[in-house]
Image (tube, rainbow, N blue to C red):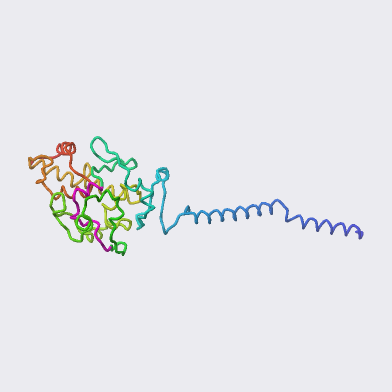
């Protein structure tokens, strides 16, 4: 091979080596690297913007919730902020519609049909005036006081807060039927009925649900209501049975005032129509 041929061969070899970096395989690798870098940047941005799943907040938005602007949270969350209230049915000022039976209508939960609003429960006289008293929760390991301040102001119009809403002393005279009913917070906690998001219990959940908050615990709490005050509810049918067997009118308050007070705490008051429907199933002794 001549010197000229040798120089030509080496020159071609150098060009081939230089061109390797521009080969299709390496081009694809560079594109892939840039794509992954961009994807990582987007994920980082999403996490900062609150779109990424967070085990700390455990906030989830379903399709319905996004459409309605409602909040869906984990039952383990303990937060109920001003932002929650602003995002929920105008802070409780928006009126929930009723059907011809007087039942409240929640479009996203048609199976939940109480006939007393949280405001009506409080205004009627309930919980011996103690519901929003200062408490220590063994569930969250926190102390709570002045929780009643999260309620819409009109719910508390005319009420004596220290005696009718946040009293540490149970007063039977505060109640509609002038009787005592219900278990202690400690009993509810030890029974496993209380979750962190609502350390006071079911009625606190109802107040917040009525105002528009939606959480993972809604189905359980609605189920509890149904078993107590629904069509086949234990206490609703207990009252109907006692009225039928007493021979008195459905609204005679001397017939089981304790059960009537209990049902009121669950947002329900016996109506003529419900009584007639339930009375058909009662067997006379």
Q: From this view, report whether residue 144 is shown above or below residue 88.
A: below
Between residues 129 and 277, which one lies in front from this camera angle? 129
Looking at the rendering, which quadrant does residue 271 occupy?
top left
Determine whether, in the image, residue 2 is placed left or right of residue 82.
Answer: right
Residue occupying the point 27% across, 64% down:
136
Determine whether, in the image, residue 238 is placed left or right of residue 87.
Answer: left
On the image, the x and y values in percent for residue 272 come to: 16, 37
Q: Looking at the rendering, in which quadrant would you find the N terminus?
A: bottom right
Residue occupying the point 41% across, 51% down:
60
Between residues 45 and 14, which one lies in front from this camera angle? 45
On the image, the x and y values in percent for residue 18 come to: 77, 57
Callout count: 0
Per the rendered image, the range of residues in magenta is 118-136
Looking at the rendering, which quadrant does residue 245 occupy?
top left
Q: From this view, report whether residue 171 is shown above or below residue 222.
A: below
Residue 266 among those drawn in magenta: no
Q: Looking at the rendering, in which quadrant would you find the C terminus?
A: top left
Residue 121 among those drawn in magenta: yes
On the image, the x and y values in percent for residue 261 come to: 16, 49
Furthest-top residue in this view: 100
On the image, the x and y values in percent for residue 98 come to: 27, 38
Furthest-front residue in this view: 158
Between residues 115 and 20, which one lies in front from this camera angle? 115
Residue occupying the point 53% across, 55% down:
45
Looking at the rendering, which quadrant does residue 143 occupy?
bottom left
């Amino acid at each position: 091979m001549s010197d000229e041929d040798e120089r030509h061969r080496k020159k071609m070899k150098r060009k081939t080596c230089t061109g390797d970096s521009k080969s299709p395989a390496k081009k694809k690798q560079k594109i892939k690297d840039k794509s992954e870098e961009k994807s990582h940047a987007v994920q980082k941005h999403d996490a900062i913007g609150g779109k990424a799943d967070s085990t700390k907040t455990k906030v989830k938005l379903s399709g319905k919730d996004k459409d309605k602007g409602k909040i869906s949270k984990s039952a383990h969350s303990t937060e109920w902020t001003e932002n929650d209230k602003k995002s929920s049915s105008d802070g409780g000022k928006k009126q929930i519609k009723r059907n011809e039976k007087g039942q409240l209508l929640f479009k996203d939960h048609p199976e939940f049909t109480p006939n007393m609003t949280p405001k009506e429960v409080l205004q009627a006289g309930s919980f011996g005036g103690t519901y929003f008293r200062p408490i220590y929760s063994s569930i969250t390991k926190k102390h709570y006081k002045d929780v009643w301040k999260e309620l819409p102001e009109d719910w508390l119009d005319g009420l004596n807060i220290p005696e009718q809403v946040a009293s540490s002393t149970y007063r039977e005279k505060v109640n509609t039927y002038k009787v005592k009913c219900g278990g202690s917070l400690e009993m509810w906690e030890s029974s496993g009925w209380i979750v962190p998001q609502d350390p006071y219990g079911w009625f606190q959940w109802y107040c917040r649900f009525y105002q528009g908050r939606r959480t993972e615990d809604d189905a359980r709490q609605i189920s509890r209501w149904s078993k107590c005050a629904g069509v086949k509810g234990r206490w609703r049918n207990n009252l109907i049975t006692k009225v039928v067997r007493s021979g008195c009118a459905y609204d005679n308050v001397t017939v089981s005032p304790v059960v009537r007070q209990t049902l009121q705490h669950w947002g329900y008051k016996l109506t003529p129509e419900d009584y007639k429907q339930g009375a058909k199933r009662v067997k006379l002794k």
